[in-house]
C-alpha cells in the first residue's frame, strides 16, 4: 500500500446514469409547452438518439410522456402533477381548501385559484370557477413567472431575506424594471396582509391575493381571485367585499392548517 487515499465526491459515489437521463428528459420537456422531437431532445441534452429513444419508450410506458401522432413530438402528461398531489402537504392543503374555495366563488361570482412556489415559479394547484357564463380562470397546473403575479408577491412577501434571494435566483433573470417593481411591492404586501394589483398579463383584471400560513408561520400558498367587473350586471359583490372575504377565507384555511396554534 502506498498510503494514498482516494476521495470520492457524492456524485461519483452514487451514480445512476439511466435515472439521470430520464430526469433530464422530464426537466427539459417541462419547459417545452409544444413538446420536442426525439432528435431535438437528444441535441438539447447532448446525447445520441438511440439512448434517448430507450428512455422515451420507458417514460411513455410509465405514462409520464406521450408522443403526438401528427408530428412525432414528445410532451409531458399530467402524471407528474398527479404524483405531486399525492404528497401529503399538498394533498392536505387542497383537501382543506377545495370545498370552501368553491363556496366563496359561488357567493361572490368570481373564479379563484390556489398556488404555491415550485422551482422558482408560481404553480397553480387548485382552480375553481364561479357559476357565471363569463369567467377569468388560470389553468390548473400552470407554472407562471413570479414577477407577473399577485400570488408571487404574496408568496415572497413573508420570506426571510435568504429564502427570498434563493427564490429570485431560482426564478432567473428578469427585466430590471419588473424586478425592482416586484421587490418594491413586497413590503407593502406584507404590511397590508394581501396583494391588490392590476394584472400584468390581462387588461381589466384586478388580482386579489392573500397568504395561507402553516403551523410554523410560513406562507405555504396564495389564494387569488382575478376579479373582473361584468358589464352585464352579474358582478354582485364589490371589490372591497370580495377582498375582505378572500382574506377571511385565507385566514380560516390557515387556522385549519394549524397557524397560530399555541400563540
Image (cartoon, helix red, strand yellow):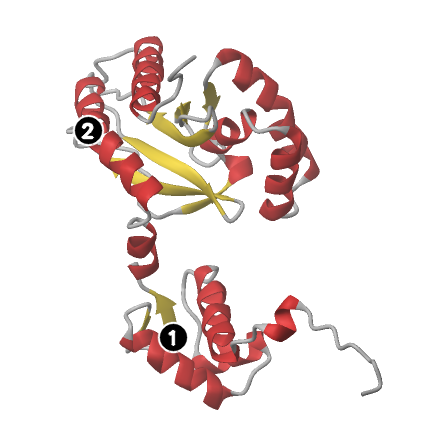
Name the residue located 39 percent from the left edge and 37 percent from the top edge.
Answer: 115
The front one of 81 and 230 is: 81
Residue denoted by label 1? 73
Q: Residues within 10 Å of mark 2 (few under 14, many from 20)?
A: some
- Quadrant assignment for the N terminus: bottom right
Name the residue located 61 percent from the left edge and 28 percent from the top edge.
Answer: 160
Q: Do tag 1 and tag 2 residues touch (Cβ < 8 Å)?
A: no
On screen, 15 above or below 213? below
C-alpha gap between disc 1 and disc 2 = 37 Å
Q: Which label sits in the foreground, 1 or 2?
A: 2
Residue 146 visible, this orientation: yes
On screen, 20 above or below 192? below
In-image side of 227 versus 9 (left or right): left
In-image side of 155 versus 12 (left or right): left
State the image coordinates of residue 95 (x, y, percent, origin top left).
Answer: 23, 36
Q: Please report whichever mark, 1 or 2, sits nearer to the chain's N-terminal start.
A: 1
In-image side of 225 versus 157 (left or right): left
**Secondary structure type for disc 2:** helix
Q: Quadrant of residue 164?
A: top right
State the image coordinates of residue 52 (x, y, percent, origin top left).
Answer: 46, 83
Residue denoted by label 2? 102
The front one of 236 and 92 is: 92
Q: Quadrant of residue 77?
A: bottom left
Q: Residues within 10 Å of mark 1 (few under 14, many from 20)?
A: some
**Secondary structure type for disc 1:** loop
The front one of 87 and 40 is: 87
Residue 139 visible, this orientation: no
The disc label shown at residue 182, or none: none
Name the residue located 34 percent from the left edge and 11 percent from the top edge.
Answer: 244
Amino acid at each position: 500500500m502506498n498510503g494514498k487515499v482516494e476521495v470520492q465526491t457524492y456524485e461519483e459515489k452514487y451514480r445512476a446514469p439511466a435515472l439521470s437521463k430520464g430526469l433530464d428528459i422530464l426537466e427539459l420537456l417541462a419547459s417545452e409547452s409544444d413538446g420536442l422531437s426525439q432528435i431535438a431532445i437528444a441535441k438539447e441534452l447532448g446525447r445520441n438518439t438511440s439512448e434517448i429513444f430507450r428512455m422515451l419508450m420507458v417514460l411513455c410506458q410509465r405514462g409520464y410522456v406521450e408522443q403526438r401522432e401528427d408530428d412525432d413530438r414528445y410532451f409531458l402528461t399530467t402524471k407528474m402533477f398527479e404524483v405531486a398531489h399525492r404528497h401529503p402537504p399538498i394533498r392536505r392543503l387542497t383537501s382543506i381548501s377545495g370545498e370552501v374555495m368553491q363556496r366563496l366563488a359561488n357567493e361572490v361570482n368570481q373564479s379563484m385559484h390556489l398556488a404555491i412556489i415550485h422551482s422558482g415559479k408560481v404553480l397553480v394547484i387548485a382552480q375553481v370557477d364561479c357559476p357565471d357564463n363569463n369567467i377569468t380562470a388560470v389553468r390548473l397546473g400552470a407554472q407562471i413567472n413570479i414577477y407577473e403575479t399577485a400570488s408571487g408577491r404574496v408568496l415572497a412577501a413573508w420570506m426571510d431575506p435568504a429564502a427570498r434571494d434563493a427564490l429570485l435566483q431560482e426564478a432567473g433573470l428578469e427585466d430590471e424594471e419588473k424586478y425592482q417593481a416586484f421587490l418594491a411591492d413586497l413590503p407593502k404586501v406584507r404590511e397590508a396582509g394581501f396583494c391588490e394589483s392590476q394584472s400584468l398579463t390581462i387588461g381589466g383584471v384586478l388580482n386579489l391575493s392573500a397568504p395561507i400560513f402553516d403551523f410554523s408561520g410560513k406562507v405555504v400558498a396564495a389564494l387569488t381571485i382575478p376579479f373582473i367587473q361584468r358589464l352585464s350586471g352579474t358582478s354582485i359583490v364589490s371589490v372591497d367585499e370580495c377582498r375582505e372575504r378572500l382574506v377571511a377565507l385565507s385566514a380560516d384555511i390557515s387556522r385549519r392548517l394549524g397557524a397560530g396554534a399555541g400563540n
